[in-house]
Amino acid sequence: EESASLNFIEQIIADDLAAGFDPKKLRFRFPPEPNGYLHIGHAASICLNFGLGEKHNAPVNLRFDDTNPSKEEQEYVDAIKYDVQWLGFQWAQECYSSDYFQQMYDWAIQLIKEGKAYVDQQSAEAMAEQKGTPTTPGVASPYRDRSVEENLDLFERMKAGEFEQGTYVLRAKIDMASPNMLMRDPLLYRIVRKAHHRTGTDWCIYPMYDWAHGESDYIEQVSHSLCTLEFKMHRELYDWFLDQIYDPALLRPKQREFARRNLSYTVMSKRKLLELVQTKTVSGWDDPRMPTISGLRRRGYTPESIRHFSELSGISKRDSVTDVSLLEYCIREDLNKTATRVMAVLDPVKLVITNYPEGKTEMLTAENNPEDPNSGTHEVPFSRELYIEREDFKEEAGSKFFRLTLGNEVRLKSAYIIKGDSVVKDQDGNITEIHCTADLDSRSGSGTEASMRKVKGTLHWVSIQHAITAEVREYDRLFLDEAPDSHEDKNFMEFVNPESLKVIKEAYLEPFLKEATLDDKYQFQRLGYFTLDKDSTADQLVFNKTVGLRDSWAK
Ligand code: ATP
Ligand code: MG
Ligand code: MG
């Protein structure tokens, strides 16, 4: 009866266990290529693999699939480790495909000796042409029948660095007529003349993904190698490679595929994210508009919200696009429970309480979080001159305007009920001050009858004299199109939203925020959720808007 709640990957494992698979042999891996930062799509795979590990109390390796030195860097390795741990997971072993280069090389020698691999020296174009089409068989390479001796000699010389990049390759000798194009003598090795971030210049031949991946799974004795759907056709090759080398006394890994996670209004391939970085369309991999884990973290997302999102978006057999508003829902839900409520004014207009004594400061008590009874309170200074949001006042307004107008009352949050009296304007007619009177018996929490009075609106505010200033960055979608990389006739870069970043140079914050640290989460009341940005300095705080209080996109 459990099966109704299992996703199909969990079901595959449940079936294997039911068929007698030893649960102690379950082992998983998350296998990123260190050629970029992790994104929210990777989080699906991380949560799946580490989630299975937790569920079955089985080890999960972090395996760096580092077989292409032309794109990989130590910086990416470090960032990936940080992100996986930040998400809340701990790997059993930190592994690198590059640690297996010698073993893979030895197996390649074995294949050559068995007549199952050969060195080719044609151009990439010629080999592609010979591959044929899915409905017509390919043509054998003129080098397909080299002698074992000649192949061994050439392969050793490839390894020794005698040949230029792009000249010789080692190919598996499988079947040039296979209906699966990937089985038509796929490449095993190519020459790449670039230092590797771990093996330096020890190697100049590097294994191809298909050859390296399954063999790495086998070396680590991974039981279930979970990858995304585009590798479905590769499974036959994965199995063929294992057939050549595996010892029946050991565990034989199996590959299973699930759908990639896509997210609306963004792109997810590392190549495209790198393009955004390199063209300076964004400030870096961790720009708060990026769908990377580091970008989301900087934006104010929590590990819990990303894990919850993974759970809700699920694991599926078919490709689909998850609406980004689901991600926003997850962070909003989490921050509603945990974020400290504070007041900040982003577009200020001066409010003077004419019946409040000049020079007086009163410390008022503000609840940190009404959703959390244990969150406590903090003090907010109140004085005669405040800032409120410009849009919270109209001289005259209809009955649906629940904010301040002349002659009407509103409550100042955690403070008094005030009534608008008059305005001061500059020569151009812009309001420079609003004058009002407070009902000095109505202080919130004072228990007086006046404090219980209901008025139709509550405004946030800051005391001008006590406020600190900060830069506030607000973000919109990075792309204007729902699926920017799905257009045949247009490059995804054409859909970049030129107004995705709005900077407010001088916002006014209650002084409590002086103590903010990078991990703190705040709700700026009535405005949304905010977090400190790493660009902050002692003199200039910078806050990022994580998400609004409600979904405003649809409206
Ligand atoms: P990209 O195209 O973004 O570079 P990739 O698949 O090449 O992605 P890898 O570093 O090889 O990136 O991915 C590590 C693991 O994460 C793989 O098992 C891969 O299948 C999985 N993964 C990558 N992108 C997604 C995604 N969008 N949804 C689910 N899993 C993903
Ligand atoms: Mg990959
Ligand atoms: Mg890739």
Image (cartoon, rainbow, N blue to C red):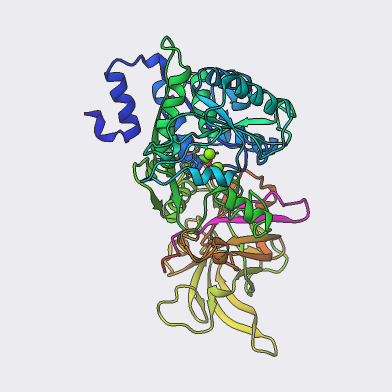
Nearer to me, 128 or 13: 128
Residue 392, position in %: x, y?
54, 73
Residue 370, position in %: x, y?
47, 49
Queried whether the magenta region covers residue 454, the answer comes back as no
| Residue at x 56%, y 45% (from the top left corner) | 126
Residue 344 to residue 122: above or below: below
Residue 299 visible in image? no
Left or right of 174: which side holds 281?
A: right
- Span shown in magenta: 531-551
Residue furthest out toward the top:
249
Residue 334 to residue 510: above or below: above
Q: Quadrant of residue 12?
A: top left
| Residue at x 66%, y 53% (from the top left corner) | 277
Q: Quadrant of residue 511?
A: bottom right
Residue 528 visible in image? yes
Residue 135 to residue 51: above or below: below
Nearer to me, 279 or 244: 244
Residue 192, position in %: x, y?
68, 36
Q: Quadrant of the N terminus?
A: top left
Nearer to me, 339 or 370: 339
